[in-house]
Amino acid sequence: MSNLSSMLQSLASKNPAKAAACDAVAALAAAAASIAAVIRQPDADAALGAIRGSANADGDDQKALDVLADEMIERALAVVPAVAAYLSEEQDAAVPLHDDGQVIVASDPLDGSSNIDTNVSVGTIFSILPASGGILQPGRNQLAAGFFVYGPQTTLLVSFGGPVMAFQLGDDGHFHDMGWSVSITTDTREFSINASNMRHWRPDVAAYIADCLAGETGPRKMNFNMRWVGSLVADGWRIFRRGGIFLYPADARRGYEAGRLRLVYEANPVAFLVEAAGGKAINGDVPILDVVPETLHARVPLVFGSANEVDEFARYRP
Ligand code: F6P
């Protein structure tokens, strides 16, 4: 079984244009292995789930682990000459690193942090962009993207534009190829949405979910299952594994006019992986990867997963 380091070395030597992105992924993997070790500490629940009394740029409560993971990732990237700047969901502005760097790394250092103290999977999401494009680029420009999941296994899904590769952290501290050909099934009977927001949904979202819930006697003529972990990385991993559709739509709550998830730190990297695995990712109307961020912390409605089901959802749009 090959490991991540040897894959990165071989990719960088065959394709020098990807060398800078490979260096960044190597640094992120080292940081992720350290974050996983911190989460495994016996007292991690209490200490790392504690609210810091601060909010991040998006107004979310910051947990101690949010801040720690952000610091660990920034430190890891700061020693990589190829990285020009670090964009973090936890920081208001871009962090300049190396004037001559070729890539920008955007990251949600600790996704799903409301789950930290419940022993549910959390993760680190990252997006690697060419430095020449500046900090507000469409996701289509990404050179590589991926996410780590800190769950029963510490895992990584990553793509450099080609196939999506899956790795698992071993006891030796290295990420090993899981030997799994990552592709999202075209069809599904499983949806993922926070149904507690139903009363705030737009009519098209409500109609789509109502038809899924109607089961085999309804218009969809089949029964659906529902799953909602509440950690994008965990819900995402499941969809890469067995298909599904994930929805975090815009809704009528104040502050949710564009959904909840961030375009630069969450939706773009997930959409990059989803398309590379044969799935689809849209904001309701257009592919996520074609949306140009207006601000670093812009939110976007996100619907992704099995291609035919995302198309089916899009048919409900007015
Ligand atoms: O962005 C943070 C996040 O925790 C995602 O990982 C997850 O998909 C979503 O928010 C959950 O939101 P809610 O608590 O509204 O269901």
Image: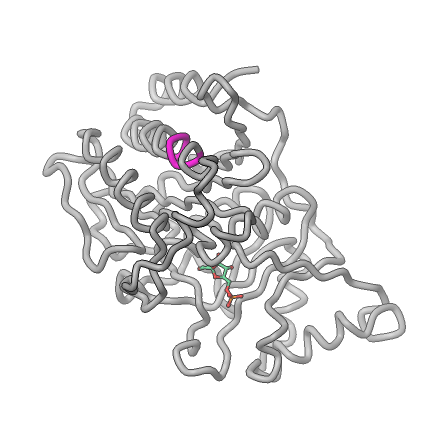
In x, y percent, where is residue 247? 57, 65
Q: Is residue 78 left or right of residue 59?
A: left
Chain part drawn in magenta: 32-36
Q: Is residue 130 left or right of residue 275?
A: left
* Magenta span contains residue 34: yes
Q: Residue 101 versus residue 126: which sits nearer the camera? A: 126
Q: In the displayed structure, would residue 44 be above or below residue 9?
A: below
At a point 54% along the width and 46% down the height, the residue shown is: 121
In x, y percent, where is residue 139? 38, 52
Q: Is residue 224 left or right of residue 250?
A: right
Q: How is the image coloured?
A: one colour
At a point 23% along the width and 36% down the height, the residue shown is: 75
At a point 71% along the width and 61% down the height, the residue shown is: 226
Dominant secondary-structure state across the stretch colored magenta: helix
Q: In the displayed structure, would residue 257 be above or below residue 189?
A: below
Q: In the displayed structure, would residue 204 be above or below residue 167?
A: below
